[in-house]
Image (tube, rainbow, N blue to C red):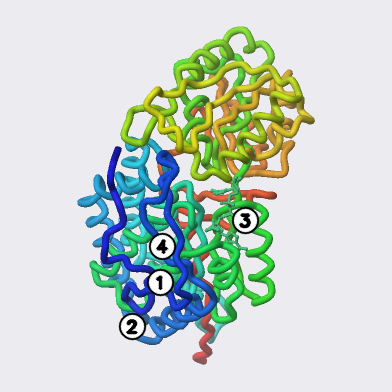
Amino acid sequence: MTAATLPDRITGLLIDGAWSEPQSGQWLDIIAPAEGKPYGRIAGAQKTDVDAAVASARRALSGEWGQLNAAERGRLLSRAGLIVQERAEELAQLEARDTGKPIAQARADLAACARYFEYYGGAADKVHGDTIPVQNGYFAATEHIPHGVTAHVIPWNYPAQMFPRSVGPALAMGNAVVMKPAEDACATPLALADIMLEVGFPPGAINMVTGLGMEAGAALSEHPDINFISFIGSSETGVAIQTAAAKSHIGCTLELGGKSAQIVFADADPALVVPTVVAAITQHAGQTCSAGSRLLIERSAMDTLLPQIIQAFCEVRVVMPHMEGQLGPVVSARQKARVERYIQLADDTGLPLLASGQMAPELSAEGYFVQPRMYGPVPRDHRLAFEEVFGPVLAVIPFDDEADAVALANATEYGLVAGIWTRDSARAMRVGRQMEVGQVFVNCFGAGGGIELPFGGMKKSGHGREKGWEALREFAAVRTLLVRHD
Ligand code: NAP
Ligand code: MG
């Protein structure tokens, strides 16, 4: 078992360019999900600590950070990306221990992390405004200016990716940021923030307040001196965030998960579809916002493709983080109980269990492991057909024809991503363009980190776009300049 732990110099909160103990005097254990026990502690920030962090960010905007030009900001981000690449293995070990995911997946997360820094570092000095033809005697132009202090609340599933995905575009545009990472997994965000100090981000450009969502998270999102909120997490907390934003008359982006459909037509290529459908629900134990948690399969493929998917699902192995396998534990005892409630519901309501994964004999008895399950056919009005489980549970639902597939795919409150599997490219286009989601994949699913690809939801999956160029626009406001010169 890996013994990765937080560096000693990270002694609590990051405020004014230095690590400090919380004024609250409160501390929380950090728990390794595969071990089910604490391996360190983080500060439990309260309102006074959050006030200090927001004040630090505000000072940064009128200090050294606010004076840097776009190229200098970009250079700092790019430098952080290079250090992440150099220390990728050490950071991946920490990520694997803190989140419980197999080390191979943590390594992929760190590669994506470095790429976010690289992408937004390179983008910082390339966000141009427009000139606009207006009536004679006037000159009109736009520029993209930072909001000011941006607040960032991220979840525990992909902390190493979420950190640069959220703060990267904000810093590129010149905002000063305050982040509250998730209490359940925040080790790599803290280590990454420390790397940003090391590469020379001026004091206050980036501030970190760990703590409980109800305390530190609420104090941050309700703070009267923030100018924008970026949130990734549950739809329920998304409502609290958007309410706080409304009360302060500021904007927010919300990325809130989903119940994403894999639409498999009978002519799909088994070599592509079988491993991908299984990976899309078992990766990080199904705790992925864009998990492919609904397998919509053409009825005529129930005897051809479905048995192959079942067989592949039965080969999935739950492992300890240092081992080779498809998934580790879920993140916490609370998350395990939540997933097990859905499994209990499936069993109590007599849903046929089509497949279950294997549990490696080396699993620690204290870890939060859940056996992956695949149920079907799931009736369309069953809760498993439309509620987000956020665990390794796949719901199989047959469909009759193209129109039925489209209606079924869109028949949830969520709208994050969809996958379409067919050799008929015209059909893929027709179906894809009717999906009420933010990303559509054809004969593939997910995009690694998908750093360059705008990502976000519709409906209960949220609004606003992260990743790619679009994220830079979210973290800036357009100012229009009109000059009369006749
Ligand atoms: P959550 O409560 O939405 O947590 C996400 C983040 O928001 C965490 O940093 C959390 O802090 C913080 N938070 C919680 N309450 C807050 C509040 N009132 N004000 C400001 N910040 C607040 O999600 P969860 O309880 O960890 O997970 C529950 C479910 O959410 C999952 O089962 C899944 O369905 C969904 N989820 C979705 C995603 C996604 O990627 N879209 C990620 C995670 C979870 P603390 O956790 O430190 O208290
Ligand atoms: Mg943890």
Disc 2 from disc 3: Cα separation: 32 Å
Q: In which quarter of the image is residue 60?
A: bottom left
Which of the two discs, 4 and 3, sits closer to the camera? 4
x then y, percent, for residue 275: 46, 22
x then y, percent, for residue 307: 56, 10
Is the residue marked by circle 1 packed among few (<14), some (14-19), or many (20+) residues within 10 Å? many
* Number of the label disc, if any, that sits on residue 207: 1
* Number of the label disc, if any, that sits on residue 67: 2
Tell me which numbered mark, 2 or 3, is placed earlier along the sequence.
Answer: 2
Nearer the observer, 223 or 37: 37
- Say if 159 sits above or below 74 in the image: above
* Left or right: 18, with 463 as reference point: left
Disc 4 from disc 3: Cα separation: 31 Å
Q: What element carries label 3?
A: strand
Q: What element carries label 2?
A: helix
The structure residue drawn at horizontal position 60% and vertical position 22%, both measured from the top left corner, is: 374
Disc 2 from disc 4: Cα separation: 32 Å
Q: Which quadrant holds the N terminus?
A: top left
Disc 1 from disc 3: Cα separation: 25 Å
Q: What residue type is labelled 3?
A: His
Nearer the observer, 361 or 326: 361
Which of the two discs, 2 and 4, sits closer to the camera? 4
Which of the two discs, 1 and 3, sits closer to the camera? 1
The structure residue drawn at horizontal position 24% and vertical position 62%, both measured from the top left corner, is: 79
Can residue 141 be seen here?
no
Is the residue marked by circle 4 packed among few (<14), some (14-19), or many (20+) residues within 10 Å? many
Residue annotated with mark 4:
42
